[in-house]
Amino acid sequence: QVQLVESGGGLVQAGGSLRLSCAGSGMFVSISHMGWYRQAPGKQREMVAVITSGGNTNYTDSVKGRFTISRDAAKNTVYLQMSGLKPEDTAVYYCTAHQVPAYDYWGQGTQVSVSS
């Protein structure tokens, strides 16, 4: 079993910054990639950013140039640095870890609210 615990959400004004953290514990082995998803009220959950064990990253178009995902493998932790936040970034942000061969773990989510 793998446990993921997010932190760092909160309320911020438009244009502000936040850094989300996600710490993994338990049987944290064979993790091929970790990432962040978000879900706004009334909308489907969407991928925000993903980082592989090799350090390759992928972002959804709406956050490119504003968000940066990084990973500290020694701490089993992934971060999401969010800058230039917009009201449309308001959502619950979820951390995920993909364990080979085919299992996805999810955190409990952390709320990010951006006021205009």
Image (cartoon, helix red, strand yellow):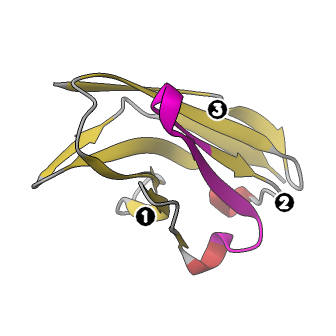
- The residue tagged 1 is 47
Q: Give the residue type at disc 3.
A: Gly
Quarter of the image that includes the C terminus: bottom right
**In this picture, is 75 found above or below 42?**
above
Packing grade of label 3 (10 A; few <14, some 14-19, many >=20) is some
Which residue is tagged 2? Answer: 84
Mark 2: amino acid? Gly
Q: Position of residue 96 (x, y in %)?
A: 35, 45
Residue topped by disc 3 = 9
Q: Where is residue 19, by image quadrant?
A: top right
How far apart are the two marked residues, 1 and 2, measured between alpha carbons? Answer: 18 Å
Q: Position of residue 6 (x, y in %)?
A: 50, 28
Mark 2 lies on a secondary structure that is loop
Going from N to C along the chain, the mark reached first, 3 or 1, is 3
| Amino acid type, residue under disc 1 in the picture | Met
Give the magenta range: 63-79
Spot occupied by residue 44 in the image (x, y as percentages of width and height): 35, 63
Looking at the rendering, in which quadrant would you find the N terminus? top left
